[in-house]
Amino acid sequence: MLGRTLAAVLTAAALACPAGAQDAYLIGATGAMTGPAAGTNGPPIEGLRLYVDRLNAASGINGKKIQLTVLDDQGEPSKAAANAKRLLTQENVSLLVLSSLSSTFAPVIAETKRANVALMLMGAVCPKEVYPPADLLQFCTTAYAGGYDSRATLAFIKETAKAPVRIGFAAMAIPLSRGEIDYAEEQAKTMGMTPVDKEVIPPPTADYTPFATKLKDANPNWIFSWAPWVTQVKTFEALRRLGWEGDYITLQMGAALHRTMVDGARLTSRPKANWHASRMENSMSSVRIHCSRTTCPFTSRSWRKRKKETCDIPPGS
């Protein structure tokens, strides 16, 4: 799948900006290889390295090898912009790859538009520019889908809730997370739910208790978080310490729940599963996860619920 995506992107890049005869396709990547977002955004770049090595061992794409240059932006917009400019103007790449926080999107997109070079986003949420009618030179490889995710999640809440829904929201203070939670808040109103609080939490927050306290005091029976995993999980942990016993629903983003301890129970994900929502309900001996596995076929602008499961995960498993 990634091979076909790379071939399509490189073809589009060649059509938009013919480079003449080259011995290799030049690809540049800027990503959060270190810093707070590295746990989520670094692995996709490492995966890309491995895949490029594999493609090159099999004669590359269209008979040409791929030359990959990776720069670390630490999730900082200014560094991402500087990396993009260097890769586009000095390395003369035909394709730029971005795997970083959404705050880096705007400056990097601006640089690629100035250079008329294709951009492929990975390891983060897809911005609206890649949805139909999509920008010719912007691509996205991840399953997180702004707008679609909130609609699927809120529909799951509406179907599952046994009482009128008083809903709180938790986001990270980065553009895509804040924008999606703002959208979810308005969408919830149209579905007969009552939004009671919304907390937008800065990325470097050490203590989530003040934000969790505001959420708890608003007395929600559901809380929805659409944010990088650290915000999702630490908000949940703080709420449980405060004694809140409502339903908490999140998206699994990247390494979201792979190695996170919640009240003594290890929450894990399953390979190749596209889990768009997880309802976590604490008990003395286990954490019960009610999962809604969904897909978002962008061409039909709809979502389809495939399967619901309930699974008990014993502490320490």
Image: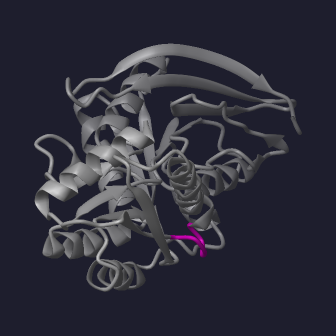
- Range of magenta residues: 32-37
Vertical arrangement, residue 254 with respect to residue 153, above or below: below
- Quadrant into which the N terminus falls: top left
Instruction: Identify the residue at horizontal 20%, vertical 43% (top origin).
Output: 131
Vertical arrangement, residue 263 with respect to residue 173, above or below: above
Q: Magenta span has 232?
A: no
Q: Quadrant of residue 85?
A: bottom left
Q: Is residue 186 left or right of residue 47?
A: left
Residue nearer the viewer, 53 or 223 = 53
Vertical arrangement, residue 259 with respect to residue 164, above or below: below
Q: Quadrant of residue 49?
A: bottom right
Instruction: Identify the residue at horizontal 25%, vertical 43% (top origin).
Output: 186
Percent position of residue 7, x then y: 32, 45
Q: Is residue 99 left or right of residue 118?
A: right
Q: How many marks?
A: 0
Q: Give the main secondary structure, helix, strand or loop, of the magenta stretch.
A: loop
Residue nearer the viewer, 58 or 311 = 58
Instruction: Identify the residue at horizontal 32%, vertical 23% (top origin).
Output: 303
